[in-house]
Image (cartoon, rainbow, N blue to C red):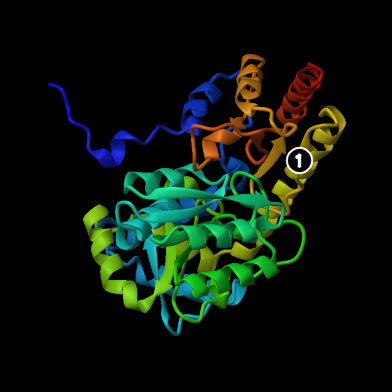
Amino acid sequence: MEYKIANRIAGVQGSIIRELFKLAADPNMIAFGGGNPSPDTFPTEEIARITAEVLEKNPSSVLQYGLSEGYPPLRETMKKHLAKVEHLSFDKNELFILSGGQQCADLVTKVLVNEGDVVLVEEPSFVGCLNTFRSYGAKLVGIPMQPDGMDLDALEAALRENKNVRLLYIITSFQNPTGFTTSAEKRRKIYELAQKYDICIFEDNPYGELRFAGEHLDPIKALDTDGRVLYAGSFSKTMAPAFRLGFLVFDQALVSRMTVAKQCTDVHSTTLFQYICNEYMTKCDYDGHIEKTRALYRHKCDLMLSEMEKQFAPGVRFNRPEGGLFVMAFLPDGMDSYPFVAEGIKRGVACVPGIAFAADESGTHNGFRMNYSSPADDKIVKGVEILGKLTHEWLSR
């Protein structure tokens, strides 16, 4: 039969990154294209022990249906943790455990955004959330990124020019794809603009605990006095992505709506993995685990950057991230990175063109994203060497 596809999904394109995963399956391909954490960071022994113990002693507690809001002990553990490390207050806020950071975006959009509403996004930004907004019929307006965060003049201009802005989406620390971090001053000014124009902020912070350089910056949510900031995080980068667990912090006034939205989607997130996370955070050396993860990514990032400094043509710019999983390189202004990335794939190195992260997919972008967390050290060196030679060829044309 001929299917009539719903408008909400008909115009949403598949992720270029997911397509690159297929290429990365080639054992000869050097994969800078994904966003996987290093498997060396997975606490496999502890996960195996905790799982075996609960399945032997009390299996029904983790194999039965759970609460839509999340496993209560983990919710309380995360509230204490976020109050300590991010200075969040839970006097008027609630925390739900959801099925990954992606579901955080889905439920926020489902609850707050109507078809035709405007969502302001960093340009470029995480394609998974951009596609979520698109799937609900939102109009995306991109705000250019600078090394210290959004261009504030462009942000206020967009707020003035678009009368039905419902949401501002921002990844404040080690942004995907650029690796940029929004400065403390800009965080404060962005919050003030949200107050002035009466919009909500969806603050995504999946990489926040992966800071390996510089000083900690409190999230915008820590400034929130009127409940307009919804704050998302994930266990995918700190525990294991297959758990598919994230968390969302939001004003208590939204509890009933968020609960219904969750129940309409998947009833509840996996209780077994929530139990494992809580046991690990409360009974194992979680802080030590995070420090080891940071040390590994510091090493990998430093290695990639030092090789890029040696190998890349002088006209190629790139940032020096203070955490997270990514660095973005930029060809000279006016150049399109898509054919550059395509040629790199032909030569055995997969990275992601900047247009994959654009609010307007019909344009061009001069950046390409590189991931340092998952490739082995020798692959980082070899892959950067290949791309470096390509930059010299590209810029000499």
Is label 1 in a helix, a strand or a loop? Answer: strand
Mark yes or no: residue 203 visible. Answer: no
- Between 292 and 389, the residue placed more toward the observer is 389
Residue, x 48% and y 47% (percent of image)? 241
Mark yes or no: residue 17 visible. Answer: yes
Q: Position of residue 145 (x, y in %)?
A: 64, 50
- Between 185 and 96, the residue placed more toward the observer is 185
Residue that lies at the very extreme toward the front in this rendered image: 161
- For the N terminus, give its image quadrant: top left
Rendered image quadrant of residue 284:
bottom right
Q: Position of residue 20 (x, y in %)?
A: 52, 27
Residue that lies at the very extreme toward the bottom in this rendered image: 91
Rendered image quadrant of residue 66:
bottom left
Lateral position of residue 239 relative to residue 333, left or right: left
Residue, x 55% and y 19% (percent of image)? 26
Residue, x 69% and y 59% (percent of image)? 291
- Between 222 and 316, the residue placed more toward the observer is 316
User: Amino acid under label 1?
Assistant: Phe
Lateral position of residue 132 relative to residue 149, left or right: left
Q: Position of residue 240 (x, y in %)?
A: 50, 49
Crowding at label 1, few (<14), some or many (≥20) Cα neighbours within 10 Å?
Answer: many
Q: Is residue 319 above or below residue 153?
A: above
- For the C terminus, give its image quadrant: top right
Q: Position of residue 301 (x, y in %)?
A: 74, 43
Q: Is residue 301 above or below residue 197?
A: above
Residue, x 25% and y 39% (percent of image)? 7
| Residue denoted by label 1 | 318
